[in-house]
Amino acid sequence: MVSMEKIVSLCKRRGFVFPSSEIYGGLNGSWDYGPLGVELKRNVKEAWWQDMIAQHDEVEAPPGAPGAFDMVGLDSALLMNPRVWEASGHVGGFNDPMVDCRETKVRYRADQLVVFAVALEGPGEPREVVDDVLFAAPGELGKTPEDELLAVHKKRIAAIERGRGRGRRVTIEPRPDALRAEAERRKTLAPGATEPGTLTAPRAFNLMFKTHVGALEDHSSVAYLRPETAQGIFVNFRNVVDTARVKLPFGIGQIGKAFRNEINPRNFTFRSREFEQMEIEFFCAPSEAAAWYAYWRDRRFRWYVELGIRSDSLRLREHGRDELAHYAAACADVEYAFPFGLSELEGVANRADFDLRQHMQASGKDLRYFDDQAATEEARRFLPHVIEPSAGVDRATLAFLCDAYAEDEVGGEPRTVLKLHPRLAPVKAAVFPLVKKEGMPEKARTVRATLKGRFKTIYDEKGAIGRRYRRQDEAGTPFCITIDGESMTSDTVTVRERDDCAQTRVSIGALAQYLADRIEA
Ligand code: GAP
């Protein structure tokens, strides 16, 4: 498994992702996508939009679907009337528990800060738990809290071993709920603190970014940067039904930025304060909600596999009843085995009629659907139920990068290669003249021009051909097209494949179609 350090280093080196405002020291939880990263991220969004919305055929039911359905798109404003967030429950309840260290001034998410007790074990001796001093540790980039603990509290633990160990081995064991108990917190040594007892009790922290709209900065001008794109869809439900002439079941999809004042942004772009979501709200008759939930859960899992993620790196985790929000009938996470552990890529939830009901009550507007085919008046007007597949663009992009990363040997030399699905690859083809003479550069530019408008390509004539291949392998470019001596007489080129380095001679006239077939396949 690739380490996060390798992914972060490749992203920086090749211009996929940079720390935001880096020349000023960066800003925690914000990232900039460089020239290759922006192409990759756009391709992820484009694949989602094409596969879920634009290419959707409303006449025929796709495999596994309970029936045919419509899909339409939306691009709602980022700033909305603050009453949206009161009705949705975000103002009152979109909280994470936080803990502050009074000495180091560092703030932690309480559920990410794990408290451990040290235990001493020796052959033939009973296990002894040293619980007059406890250690707290957060999991950092690519590390578990256990690894982090042993690193940050190394000296203190070594001192316990020397003082009380008498040759016994030190192990650590988690102390769940220790942060809630005052007596336990008093004994707990926080990361970087010199004395125990500096952590505060957990407090609720609202994750929404507040701002002010207009010139006045008072209570009446408060607005929020949206923490999800979903509410923009719910508040436009009536507009879409009235204008797009869609009938149940149908879905509205949206891609856009979301902002959360995360207490501890971490694991590179995985948890950031500014990120993008790709969300669908799928509206259906209440009696069909369970069947549509199963369809979307499986469809969204399959989408990642179709775009090249190995299915053994993915897991579909159905939530237990105790994990579900009070209004949700079911929820499943699509999880990916990131180098820092199995973590959520996307959530698919059956939200029943919670959101439409909340907005109907708060706005006073009738958001019920009118079914003119229903037999009775009661059956004609009802609130549809909603299935919500909610994916993160940045998390999907990171998962595609991690899964595509490989190190192998070509011609006895080590190489790093990104085996991205050709649909996602930032550059589809690189065009090279074998040498910078004999008319090859001119011919290579002509060949590149035949691909313009269909594929993102680059031209490279610098350095030995092997080095040029290596540069493209690291960028994930699936095809390298070389113009050589034979090209000058036969109007053919060689197409070299990124993954197995196989080379095929293709006529220049057939090249664009050859690439199109391979990219779509
Ligand atoms: N409308 C439902 C909703 O927003 P969520 O589980 O809070 O649900 C959905 O978020 C997806 O958005 C997550 O599965 C993840 O991919 C992405 N996401 C959420 N918070 C994120 C963050 N701080 N950084 C990056 N992506 C995030």
Image (cartoon, helix red, strand yellow):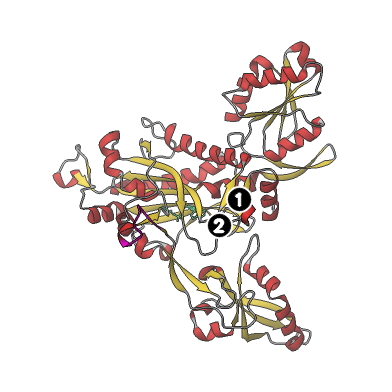
- In depth, the one of 222 and 1 nearer the eye is 222
Q: Residue at x 79, y 24 (%)?
A: 434
Which part of the image, by quadrant, shows the C terminus? top right
Residue 163 relative to residue 90: left or right? right
Furthest residue in direction right, as rendered: 412
What element does badge 2 sit on?
loop
Find out whether the residues at labels 1 and 2 contact each other: C-beta distance under 8 Å: no
Give x and y (percent) for residue 387: 37, 48
Residue 66 relative to residue 392: left or right? left
What residue did someone put label 1 on?
Answer: 313
Q: Earlier in the sequence, mark 1 or mark 2?
A: 2
Q: Amino acid at mark 2?
A: Gly
Give, as a single range, the part of the protein colored magenta. 211-219
* Disc 1 packing (10 Å; few <14; some 14–19; many ≥20): some
Q: Is residue 457 magenta?
A: no
Numbered mark located on residue 29 in the image: 2
> Main SS type for the magenta part?
loop
Q: Amino acid at mark 1?
A: Ser
Badge 2 residue CB within 8 Å of ligand 1: yes
Furthest residue in direction front, as rendered: 215
